[in-house]
Image: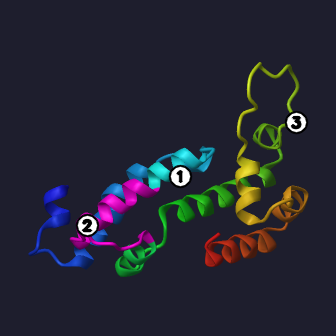
Amino acid sequence: MKKILTNKHITIETRKRALQCYIEPVLMYGCEAWTISKQIQNKLEATEMWFLRRMLRIPWTAKKTNERVLNEANKRSLVRTIRKRQATFLGHVMRRGKLEHLVTTGKFEGKRSRGRQRKKIMGGLATWLGPGRVSYILAAVKDRDLWRDMIANAYKQGT
């Protein structure tokens, strides 16, 4: 793959398409169910930048920010795409109203195991869509059009 991404004889558009078709699906496999911590987010961003810098032939010594590299590649951040997929999947799960809904909201019975509390998908999406909006999110999920608009607005803002 490195030979394809760094080949001078292949156009940048073709290299972008190869990145989008072969590498991004592998990086994002099952991302709808992930709880993204800061550490995982940093690793994803570093991997994405590694591929883009190789593809655009930007050396590490060049002082270009990650945002500038993303602008040169005409791409959105991989983490933002993952957040959008998670929000879409959350809407799907919450409208079903079954076991997945109970697990997502944390309303299942039983004793919690010892140690630090686990991160929840709802917590990550609440910070992405706006702090302190969990109850509003749960209400908005029921209205499909409102939920789609919320996701689209958050994706455009790049939060």
Tell me: residue 123, above or below residue 76.
above
Q: Which residue is mark 3?
A: 107
Q: In this image, 147 relative to 77: left or right? A: right
Q: Which percent across, then down, holds residue 138?
A: 86, 57
Residue type for callout 3: Lys
User: Which residues make up the magenta segment?
Assistant: 45-66
Q: Nearer the viewer, residue 133 or 110?
A: 133
Residue 82 spot, x, y in % from top left: 55, 58
Rendering coords of residue 93 (x, y %): 73, 50
The quadrant of the picture occupied by the C terminus is: bottom right
SS at mark 3 in the image: loop
Residue placed most toward the observer, 113 or 152: 113
What label does residue 115 carry, if any?
A: none
Kind of residue at disc 1: Gln
Q: Which mark is residue 41?
A: 1
**Cα distance between the residues tagged 2 and 3:** 51 Å
Q: Which residue: 30% across, 71% down?
A: 16
The question of residue 52 being in magenta is answered with yes
Type of amino acid at the residue the image marks with label 2: Thr
